[in-house]
Amino acid sequence: MKAVISGYGRMGHMIEKTLEANGIEVAGKSEDIASFPAGEAAGCVCIDFTTPEAFRKNYPVLAANFKAVVVGTTGWDDIRDEVIACFEKNGTPMIHSSNFSVGVNVFSAAVSLVSKLLGKAGGYSPYIVEKHHIHKLDAPSGTAKSLAREVKAGMGTDPEVTSVRVGELAGTHTVGFEGLADRITLEHEAFSRQGFASGAVLAAKMTEGLTGVHEFKELFFKD
């Protein structure tokens, strides 16, 4: 397998090291993925960790040129159907996630279960607090939005979501359920970006023989 990194910032550097540690050749790394030769792209998996603006501009190129694509960029929920349709039209497999951390995906499953149980019980009000470094461009985070969807699906109500941008925090997500007699709190804290990089590389491996567009958690929890 060969991989190309789209977006060579902090995450890009960490993904490069993780790919190399897994014996996967890094065929290129670019801040301008549209300039990457299409002939070379056809044999590569592209791992995209750019910006919402860059991804909105580049996704047709990714879908048309690459063997498969892993998308960790967030902030494009409003064009989600358009993006999925583009990849499906081109027959290019794509795995996307608001957060590729294995721990976060297990955490999300736990939030989903608790939300369903409390939705049946009644009497609880949900909320989410997400904290990230000052360089993060979107707020709320894509992970917080995904968690909010899990809560709403289980409880039928939208949770209050609060975003904090401070220092160099890798990312902390807290989901709380406030009742009259008690409070339930679930929390995931990332110590570094390594969890995101490891999950993205795992997703790249999953694209072998894959067809269609999938969320990482669908494949991760698949029997």
Image (cartoon, grey):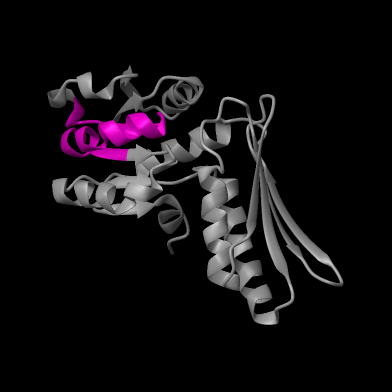
Whether 150 is drawn above or below 165: the answer is below
Residue 35 falls left or right of residue 101: left
On the question of residue 170 being in view, the answer is yes
Q: Which residue is depicted at the point 27% across and 32% down?
A: 57
Closer to the camera in the image, 79 or 101: 79
Whether 50 is drawn above or below 171: the answer is above
Residue at the far right in the pictured view = 181
Say which quadrant the N terminus sits in: top left
Total numbered labels placed on residues in the image: 0
Q: Position of residue 223 (x, y in %)?
A: 43, 64
The picture quadrant where one finds residue 136 is top right
Residue 195 falls left or right of residue 57: right
Closer to the camera in the image, 208 or 55: 55
- What is the span of residues highlighted in magenta in the rendered image? 41-69
Q: Which residue is depicted at the point 64% across and 76% down?
A: 119
Q: Where is residue 181 in the image (x, y as percent from the top left)?
A: 87, 72
On the question of residue 210 being in view, the answer is no
Closer to the camera in the image, 94 or 205: 94
Q: Which residue is depicted at the point 15% across and 26% down?
A: 38
Q: Where is residue 154 in the image (x, y as percent from the top left)?
A: 57, 71
Residue 185 falls left or right of residue 142: right
